[in-house]
């Protein structure tokens, strides 16, 4: 990939990357290099973006460093040196801790900086965070992404953007190495609401695929033939082509973890309840993913929800055997 057009050369307002007093492009910050954030930061560095990264587990910065990023000593170091900072953090608690929200240091931490919130949190949390950042003199953009580890590695994520128009316009070019499509959704928190809607479809789709696979296996069907029929039909998709082979091979290396799916499921359910929206399929999925976590599969890929479905089948079979005895 070539350098991102305009990266590090935007004006010196809070919405742009800016430059230091010598004219050297100020680095862009990236905090949170987990399953998704790691490959996203690698793609930014490979595109020529001057990148400063930090992760709570330092060894997760190695791939980004090999791609040309510099590794900061702390999250505070990133926020002190960068005018635009991507935040790909696990949850609301982690965001508040990194930004020192709720402490006297918060205003100094975010003033004059553009914070790009790329993780998935409750929409109302994001709206409140934006209000606090703006009040402290910073800029704020929601940019949650749709996709899992493989699309993140390939720079094929889909970003949903929300925030003030000028801030969104300044951040959008920096997303090109990570995302093949970006959509402006309106004011905060509309990008996160959009992400939750997309995730509802993803969760119910993958759970349905997993149940269909289990049904086929229990009826003695050939697994490869099932995948071939599925792939030839109208339901085939990038998701089914990625997840069905994992089910066939019982290969549960993580692309999107069961525990993370359960967290997202809970966020969607809470948003549905707050708006009085029925979510019957989501609620069924929530129960299955909770069962998968209780069975010890929280760190496995989301198709490991298969274990919960199998456990229900086994329990039903045992109950039927007892009744017939």
Image (cartoon, grey):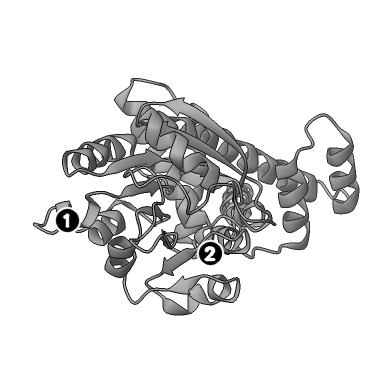
- Looking at the image, residue 238 sits to the left or right of residue 118; the answer is right
Instruction: Tell me the residue at 41%/51% (across/down).
Output: 17
Q: CA distance from mark 1 to mark 2?
A: 27 Å
> Which residue position is annotated with label 2?
38
For this orientation, the residue located farthest to the left is 104
Question: Residue 108 — which label?
Answer: 1
Nearer to us of marks 1 and 2 is 1
- Looking at the image, residue 270 sits to the left or right of residue 157; the answer is left
For this orientation, the residue located farthest to the front is 22
On screen, residue 155 above or below 181: below
In percent of width and height, residue 64 lies at 55, 70
User: 306 and 46: which one is in front?
Assistant: 46
In percent of width and height, residue 226 lies at 86, 45
Q: Earlier in the sequence, mark 1 or mark 2?
A: 2
On screen, residue 248 above or below 227: below
In percent of width and height, residue 23 lies at 41, 60
User: 228 and 33: which one is in front?
Assistant: 33
Q: Quadrant of residue 206?
A: top right
Question: Residue 54 — which label?
Answer: none
For label 2, count other residues whose C-alpha is less than 10 Å away and answer few (under 14), some (14-19) or many (20+): many
User: 129 and 91: which one is in front?
Assistant: 129
- Looking at the image, residue 196 sits to the left or right of residue 137; the answer is right
* SS at mark 2 in the image: helix
* SS at mark 1 in the image: helix
For label 1, count other residues whose C-alpha is less than 10 Å away and answer few (under 14), some (14-19) or many (20+): some
Instruction: Tell me the residue at 49%/49% (across/down).
Output: 261
In percent of width and height, residue 191 lies at 44, 33
On screen, residue 230 above or below 183: below
- Is residue 192 in sight in this rendering? no
- Looking at the image, residue 183 sits to the left or right of residue 93; the answer is right
């Amino acid at each position: 990939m070539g350098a991102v057009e305009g990266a590090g050369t935007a004006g010196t307002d809070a919405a742009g990357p800016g430059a230091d007093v010598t004219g050297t492009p100020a680095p862009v910050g990236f905090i949170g290099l987990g399953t998704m954030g790691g490959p996203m930061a690698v793609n930014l560095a490979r595109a020529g973006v001057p990148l400063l990264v930090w992760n709570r587990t330092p060894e997760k910065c190695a791939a980004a460093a090999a791609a040309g990023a510099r590794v900061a000593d702390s999250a505070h170091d990133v926020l002190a040196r960068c005018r635009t900072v991507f935040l790909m953090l696990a949850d609301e608690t982690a965001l508040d801790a990194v930004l020192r929200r709720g402490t006297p240091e918060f205003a100094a931490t975010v003033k004059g900086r553009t914070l790009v919130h790329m993780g998935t949190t409750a929409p109302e949390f994001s709206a409140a965070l934006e209000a606090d950042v703006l009040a402290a003199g910073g800029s704020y953009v929601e940019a949650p992404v749709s996709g899992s580890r493989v699309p993140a590695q390939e720079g094929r994520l889909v970003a949903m953007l929300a925030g003030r128009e000028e801030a969104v316009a300044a951040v959008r070019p920096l997303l090109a190495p990570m995302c093949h499509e970006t959509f402006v959704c309106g004011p905060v928190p509309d990008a996160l609401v959009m992400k939750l809607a997309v995730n509802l479809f993803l969760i119910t789709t993958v759970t349905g695929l997993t149940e269909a696979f289990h049904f086929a296996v229990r009826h003695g069907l050939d697994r490869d033939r099932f995948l071939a029929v599925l792939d030839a039909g109208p339901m085939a998709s990038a998701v089914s082509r990625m997840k069905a082979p994992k089910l066939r091979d019982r290969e549960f290396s993580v692309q999107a973890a069961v525990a993370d799916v359960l967290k997202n499921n809970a966020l969607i359910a809470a948003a549905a309840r707050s708006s009085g929206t029925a979510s019957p399929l989501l609620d069924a999925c929530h129960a299955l993913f909770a069962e998968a976590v209780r069975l010890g599969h929280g760190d496995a890929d989301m198709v490991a929800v298969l274990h919960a479905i199998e456990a229900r089948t086994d329990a039903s079979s045992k109950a039927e055997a007892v009744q017939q005895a």
